Amino acid sequence: AESTSAAMLKTVGSRGAMRALNRSVFRTFARRMGGSASDAERAHLSEKQRKLMKLEDDFGAHNYHPLPVVLSKGKGVKVWDVDGKEYYDYLSAYSAVNQGHCHPKIIAAMKEQADILTLSSRAFHNDVLGPYCEFVTKYFGYERVLPMNTGVEGGETACKLARRWGYAVKGIPSNKARILFAEDNFWGRTLAAISSSTDPSSYAGFGPPMPNFDIVPYNNLAALDKKLSENASEYCAFMVEPIQGEAGVMVPDAGYMKKAKEICKKHNVLLIADEVQTGCGRTGRTLCVEWDDVKPDIVVLGKALSGGTYPVSAVLSSHEVILQVKPGEHGSTFGGNPLACKIAMAALNVLKEENLVANAEKNGELTRKNLHSMKSPLVTTIRGKGLLNAIIIKPTQIKGRTVTAWDVCLEMAKNGVLAKPTHDDIIRLAPPLTSTEADINTACEIIHKTLKSFE
């Protein structure tokens, strides 16, 4: 039967569906994100951990549902809790820690610059921004960069640049510019980001949405071409993840991004690649789009751009796109600060110097080979590229209760591997790119042991 959300999308359109979705529907669809682990799930923890968690419960917002573990140290591919228990980190802060926790070269660059100058604001020049702009543009092969802080700021910046280009270059009538997004996208939780979302747990209760944001199915080139042709004179951009991370590591067909660029070019529309999670070597290429041998018009980077030490993001594009924005029309107090610039250069140098991109490809293949060899009846699907992988857990009845991906992650944590479910039944597996073959094999053995315990 057709789902309620799908029926609403078909009947009133994606933006209308947002407005029509009431609280009762939200409760039906929302994922369990806010709040804390139950008392039963915390029962095995020390009093020290439970007290620290209670402080968050009592004084913090309940907008996350973290695994019941309190971390106090990270080094390389591992983290430790406040009691000294060691874990393999298989989330890597949503791929922000590609270079491993507290990489010594990145930390050294951070400490060195922190003693000299951390922030000048863009009211003045600083002696690190210029060298960084040259470095990062040459590193990724683009003409210009607009530096920001967080990934979602990068996405917002890309949307603003695309709109301005649409008006100034393409000639879209004032306030008519439209941006197309892929269904099941995720690029943050600002009002613009959730306005492009098709996940009720992101947008319900936060309307009204941003106007002129449209949705097209992911990995469907015919639908993309059709949608752009319907309003070609008003579309300025198509923003898409080369692999959808938060949606559950959804890998499109080979050539998808290359053909999407061809379709965008045909309709005089910019292709924006959201590489915040997939970039910086995560998928076995410096940028994930390199798998399709394509150069998007705009690339958004974040997360691992700092090796997980500091909020650093960047929007890369051409003279034609970035120079449409004039002084006073876009900016950030912290964007392009000397500390961020020095850290980002160190983080990107580590990727090259330690051959982490090739390591991600090699150990990604090993990871998927190990996962397939487990032949677990709980796992229905294994997918991924490089060291961005996922397994889908089939809800299974054991001793009168349903075992879910959350239960598997709880048990994995007890056994020494930290991972987190996304969309209830999917477990994302994304260790630091510094993982060795031995690390991969040991962590996979723990995952196998955990899955076997539920059979």
Image: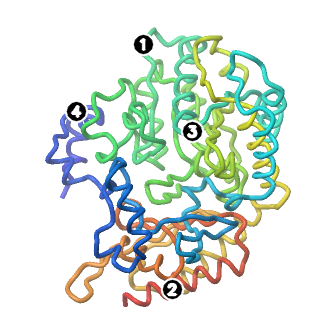
Dot placed on the residue nearer the N-terminal end, 2 or 4: 4
Identity, as a three-letter code, of the amino acid under mark 2: His
Identity, as a three-letter code, of the amino acid under mark 1: Asn
Visible residue check, residue 266: no
| For the residues bearing labels 2 and 4, Cβ distance under 8 angstroms | no
Position of residue 378 in the picture relative to residue 139 (left or right): left
Indicate the position of residue 453 as horizontal and vertical percent values.
41, 90
Q: Which residue is mark 4?
A: 19
Q: Residues within 10 Å of mark 2 (few under 14, many from 20)?
A: some
Q: Residue 20's quadrant in the figure?
A: top left
Q: Residue furthest left?
A: 24
54 relative to 313, above or below:
below
Residue 448, label in figure: 2
Q: Nearer the viewer, mark 1 or mark 2?
A: 2
Q: Residues within 10 Å of mark 3 (few under 14, many from 20)?
A: many
Q: Which residue is mark 1?
A: 175
